[in-house]
Image (spheres, rainbow, N blue to C red):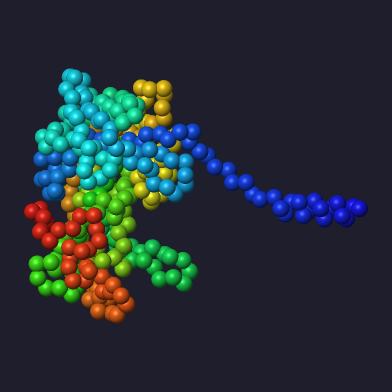
Amino acid sequence: MKSRYIIFILFAASCVEPYEFRITNQAPALVVEAFISDKSYNETLAYPSDGRYFSVKLSKTSDVINVRPEKVQGAYVTLMNDLNETWIYTESLSFAGEYLLLDPDFKAEENRQYKLSVMTGDGETYESSWERITTTDVPAMGDIGFTETQINNGKGAVPTRGVIPNVSVPENNTGGPIYYRWQFAPTWIWVAPMHYGPYRTCWASSPYYIINYATQLDDEGGYKKDLIFLKTDLNERILEEFSLLVIQHSLSEDNYYFWKEMQDRNQGKGIFDNPPYNLNTNFTSLNEEKKVYGFFGVVGEQAKRWYFNTKDLSYSIPNTLFDECSTPCGPGCPPPNCFNCLRYEAEFVTNIQPTWWGR
């Protein structure tokens, strides 16, 4: 009887399925990504760039793992300052959940405070706290350079070669810390390997190619800050010429720690791939204390454009695209971008050279 009892206990234990604990959000919560800076759309053209309007991105959290947040459409988004001046954002026709402040001359002024208000289609209203530019004497942004490096892919695997762009952080003579954040806007040339004519060379860009950002709490300056890793092996974007607009923001302390904690949590994922639960926010709900996440920042902004060519490397990167396009691969091959650069898969592709290219 004793042995039968032991066998029964072991059998019962083996039939128990493990219970998966999951923390769920009681109800979807609004996530807000927004900032304004002391550089207007017209001023950002001189970076040089295509220009940047201020935007607000709205989404809702989900308690389902690996599901992208739902974009919030049909909202009413306004910005106001402490003089009761108001600006209304326009909903984007190109990107769901994005709202644009389409005033080419608007920029944040150093002595003013600003507040963002969001009213969703279901009547819920959310407001940020009053924010202002906190550091007004940030030194001029330093030069952009790079170092060669490689990533070890494990025992027996071939390392991945690449470069790390860096920015020279000037000496900090402000008498206090400067809270930096750097974002990146890449553009590159794509040449259709099997075509000669007006659709051979295109300029491509994508906001999703480099989703990481860099942060730094600086007390003294006088050093180079590594920004991101850009691989050179098996990367068609750098075969002709690659350009990276490096955008530098100087933040308030609270805004900095929001982005720093978000960065530590996501570790290379998208900015809001993981909802910012439990992070500091400067938004509040005006209706029944609905949950809201995100941060509205008013920042100082500078930017520099960095150009990179494989000729800058100490080693060569072979361009094998023509051979790849020439290799038989069955129906549907070679792909259309082998013959027409406008068929290259990226969010923005044009065969008209940007006016700022090469500046």
Q: What's the residue at 22%, 41% (across, down)?
A: 92
Is 61 placed left or right of 175 in the picture?
Answer: right
Q: What's the residue at 29%, 40% (across, down)?
A: 97
- Residue 258 in which image quadrant: top left
7 shown above or below 134:
below
Q: Nearer the viewer, residue 206 or 311?
A: 206
Q: What's the residue at 9%, 70% (across, down)?
A: 197
Residue 129 percent coordinates (x, y): 31, 25
Q: What's the residue at 42%, 64% (across, down)?
A: 152
Q: Nearer the viewer, residue 275 or 140?
A: 275
Residue 84 percent coordinates (x, y): 19, 19
Can residue 72 be seen from the camera position used here? Answer: yes
Q: Nearer the viewer, residue 156 or 25?
A: 25
Can residue 175 be seen from the camera position used here? Answer: no
Residue 71 percent coordinates (x, y): 33, 41
Q: Nearer the viewer, residue 109 or 278?
A: 278
* Residue closest to the far right: 1
